[in-house]
Image: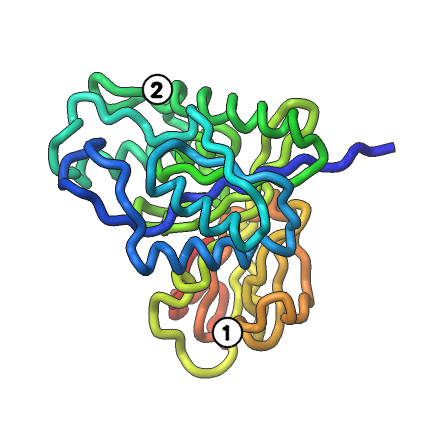
Amino acid sequence: MRTAVTRVVLARHGEAAYESDGNGDSGGSLTAGGRLQARRLGERLRASAPVAVVCSELSRAVQTAEIAAAGLGLPVDVRVGLHEHDVGAERGRPYDPGLFEPLLLGWLAGDLSVGIPGGEDGHAVARRVLAVLDDVADRHEGGTMVAVSHGGAIASVLGTVAPGGPLLPTDARDLPGCDAYVLERDAGTWRLVGRDRPAEQLDAEEPPAGPTAVLLVRRDGSKELVDGVHVHGWRDGRLLLASGDPGAGLLATVVREVPVADLLRVETVGAPDDEPEGEGDTWRMTW
């Protein structure tokens, strides 16, 4: 008899404001938008019936977890080990995208040996985060847990369990507040099985009128354009494509399931009559 699957939804904290411009100088506080993201995170997670919520000790993560957990009727357990990566020599200095964004993208691609001088490399960050996830999973085996962490910490974990995978962020901006990743543990090994993006991030750009289409780019090089559908989410390692209004949420009709392991890239496009080889009008995102 197969044991129940143990899952962790690893989510980034909501949008935050900080007391200073220096790296690592503040835990930050959620903005009004960040509080809304956290509340919506709880709503998105309700159907998964989580049994526990944990978060890092930094205030922006604690606030996010408390708001999301309130909607789930769960307490919050603050855990050391889920905090953001140590910025070393950059502590107190203004954020430098030319330094941090290539680092994050390298971690996502699996190059975890690098880090900010005087700080942590990706391996060190991933080890401590995964140690917390393992402990939480041991305590709630067969259940679904929520862990609220930070962008760099999450990137290190994703680069460890699914380096360069199709569900990973495509650039440093593609990890918005309350972006969430679904991890499953099987025989002591974690794997990435899904991504649950905030609705406001999916709709950040003006969509064209009319139906959309989804372009599936497979690892074998083949492409398939599926008309009149949108990406609804993931379940048990399968991409769910649904028809109808993308805002219908759980009421959307799932018309197709595609194994995520077969996919290299997924694009939602606003021109369903385009040929797969065409450039298309990609108005939402690349999955």
Q: Quadrant of the N terminus?
A: top right
Q: What percent of the width, then of the height, locates residue 56? A: 41, 33
Q: Give the x, y percent position of residue 114.
A: 30, 22
Q: Residue at x 51, y 39 (%)?
A: 76
On the image, numbered disc 2 is attached to which residue? 113
Q: Nearer the viewer, residue 239 or 15?
A: 15
Between residues 15 and 103, which one lies in front from this camera angle? 15
Q: Amino acid at mark 2?
A: Ser
Q: Is residue 67 found left or right of 115 in the rendered image? A: right
**Element class at badge 1:** loop
Three-letter amino acid code at disc 1? Answer: Thr
Please state the horizontal and vertical placement of residue 61, each as a whole percent of the image. 38, 41
User: Whole-Å distance between the Cαs marked 1 and 2?
Assistant: 40 Å
The answer to whether 106 appears left or right of 188 in the picture is left
**262 is higher (above) or lower (below) than 89:** below
Q: Nearer the viewer, residue 138 or 224?
A: 138
Quadrant of residue 139 in the image? Answer: top right
Q: Is residue 224 visible?
A: yes
Residue drawn at the location 42% of the way across and 50% of the way down: 178
Residue 83: x %, y % from top left: 37, 30
User: How packed is label 1: few (under 14 Cα within 10 Å), some, or many (20 or more)?
Assistant: many
Residue at 52% across, 62% down: 215
The colour scheme applied to this rendered structure is rainbow
Which residue lies under the disc numbered 1? 212
